[in-house]
Amino acid sequence: MQLSGTIQKMHTHLNRGIAQYQLPIGDKLLNMNDLVGEEITLSFNHLIHCAHCGKKTNKSYSQGYCYPCSQKLASCDLCIMKPETCHHHLGTCREPQWGLDNCFSPHLVYLANSSGAKVGITRKSNTPSRWIDQGALSALPILEVDTRLKSGLLEMALKQFVNDKTNWRKMLKNEVDPINLCLIRDELLDKIKSTIDSTGAQVLNNEALEINYPVVEYPSKISSLNFDKTPTITGVLKGIKAQYLILDCGVLNIRKFGAYNITLTY
């Protein structure tokens, strides 16, 4: 079978502890879990259309936008990557209403084990998808606040003691040891008590969520695939983790190629 159209990052959810993936392609949602173990071909049709305005663009910016949209959308602003620099209160937000809807909503500060312990933040409504997108084997929300800015301040405080990045190669090879996130939480919260108090954060006492991925074989060596260099990619789909398709010929980061028009044959 064949499907053609513009793709975006895969939709994710959990079912009985296993990450489920659906690829938006055109107006369809393709269940990618069903294709694990099968040979697939992904062909770039040399068309990229902005995910916001729909105009044709020669290059995708900020994972799916044309250059003008990447410069005007609040979702593409630097403060999305660095929430502690939120400037909505200064009246300089690119889209004030978008900021109110997205940045002034409940946010979680969490610990995750994707390639070792890391700290991160996310909107409360974006769990567990955020953790699946990072390839986390386990995740634990530890604090809740009412704004993105406050979550960024807490993350900055925690980054003094724990990493905030994922080693994506280790994550994809599954070279990840089990970690007691609850124990790490208890140790870290004592170290940032003043920031917890100043932000009014609610301390959470949850159990860690365990996540399994539809992978039949992890790669021993990572080779990145790229539509701009290899327009047609054919291989056996060995699994899916984070936003990566793990093929027997390499790994493809679907999120990187948002707004690309492709044909998928299976």
Image (cartoon, rainbow, N blue to C red):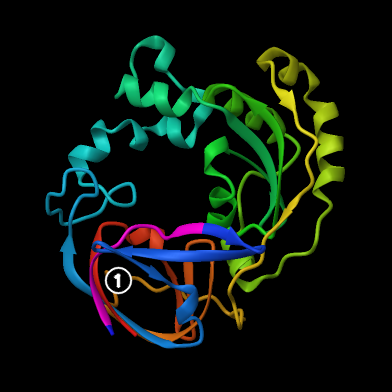
Residue 123 appearing in the image: no
Locate the C terminus by quadrant: bottom left
Residue 177 left/right relative to 137 = right
Residue at left offset 51%, top offset 29%: 83
Please check the rendered image and state whether residue 70 is part of the magenta-colored stretch, yes or no.
Answer: no
The amino acid type, in three-letter code, at marker 1 is Phe
Horizontal arrangement in the rendering, residue 201 relative to residue 153 (left or right): right
Q: Mark 1 points at which residue?
A: 227
Q: Is residue 11 magenta?
A: yes
In the depicted view, which residue is nearer to us: 128 or 248? 128
Q: Residue at x 59, y 69 (%)?
A: 172
Residue lying at 27% horizontally and 69% vertically, measured from the top left? 228
Q: Is mark 1 on a helix, strand or loop?
A: loop
Is residue 35 at least partly visible in the picture?
Answer: yes
**Region in magenta:** 2-12
Q: Quadrant of residue 177?
A: bottom right
